[in-house]
Each structure stands twice: as structure tokens, then as C-alpha cells.
Image: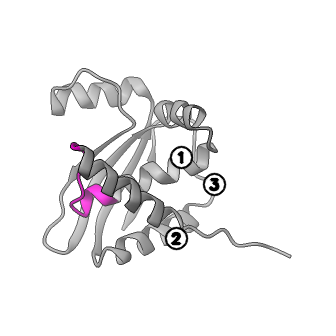
Amino acid sequence: MINFNYLTDYQIVKEELYSQWLLEVIGSENRALGDIAYVFCDDAYLLKVNQEYLKHDTYTDIITFDYTDGNTMAGDIFISLDRVKENAAEFKVDFDEELRRVMAHGILHLSGYGDKSDKEAKVMRAKEEEKMKLFHVEQKN
């Protein structure tokens, strides 16, 4: 099950659409869905998580706690909407597009992809692009 949790005023408008997309992303990595919780928060909250659990004193856009068991994907994915907004402006992309990129990034971490080295980061970016293309918005005529 995919759960969306909000610690800010922001809320995804079409959660079902995002859930379906995330299921496609998970399936494209040949994984099964366990329990995944997205927690949308602000910089201050995610900084506290970063300091307390990872001993890092820096802002970040995402922290992923991986509880995957074998092929069954599970985890908690914390996303700072402040960072997403700032990154969207910096990269000159729509907020929703950047948010989807970060959401896919979390799933990719749960799939075993890293991003610490340049080589890993290059693979991660390519995978993000691939997963972004799986998102489809229904068009009404």
C-alpha cells in the first residue's frame, strides 16, 4: 500500500493517479509493493530527521528509509517541499514535475540504486528520466 502523509498545507490533488504511476515504477523494477509511506514536510522537519537519524546537519530534498524485504518494496520516504520548490526554480521545471522526479528517486533508492558516486548519480538520473515518462495524465476531450 502507498500512503501519502502531509505535514504541510500541500496535498497531492490526484493521489490515485500518483499511486497508479508509482505502482508502474515499482513494477518496472520487477518489484512487488509492500508498504511505502511518503511524508511531505518542510525543510525544518526534514533537517531534524537528517540530524537525528543520519547525523547530517544539512538540508536535503529527500531521505529514504528502506525496509524492503527480498523482492517486496517497503520504506518511508520523506520529501521536503521547500527543497522541491527551490530545485524546480533552479532547474527551470514545473513544481509537479520536480516532485515526481523526487518521488521516483525514493522508489529507485528502495530498488537498490545509489547516488553517492558520479557513476551512481549518472545511472540514477537516467532511471529518473525513464520513470518520469511512465506518468500519464488523462486528457479529456
Determine whether, in the image, residue 90 is placed left or right of residue 29: right
Q: Position of residue 86 (x, y in %)?
A: 53, 30
Q: Position of residue 58 (x, y in %)?
A: 29, 23
Whole-angstrom CA distance, mark 1 to mark 2, is: 14 Å
Q: Which picture quadrant has residue 35? A: bottom left
Q: Tell me which segment is drawn in magenta.
A: 108-117
The reply to whether the magenta stretch includes residue 109 is yes
Q: Nearer the viewer, residue 106 or 5?
A: 106
Crowding around mark 1 (Cα neighbors within 10 Å: few <14, some 14 to 19, many 20+) is many
Mark in front: 2 vs 3: 2
Q: Position of residue 122 (x, y in %)?
A: 33, 52
User: Is disc 3 placed on a helix, strand or loop?
Assistant: loop
Circle 3 residue: 13
Q: Mark 1 is on which residue type?
A: Glu
Classify the position of the N terminus by image quarter: bottom left
- The residue shown at (50%, 69%) is 21
Marks 2 and 3, the one that precedes in the sequence: 3
Circle 1 residue: 98
Circle 2 residue: 134
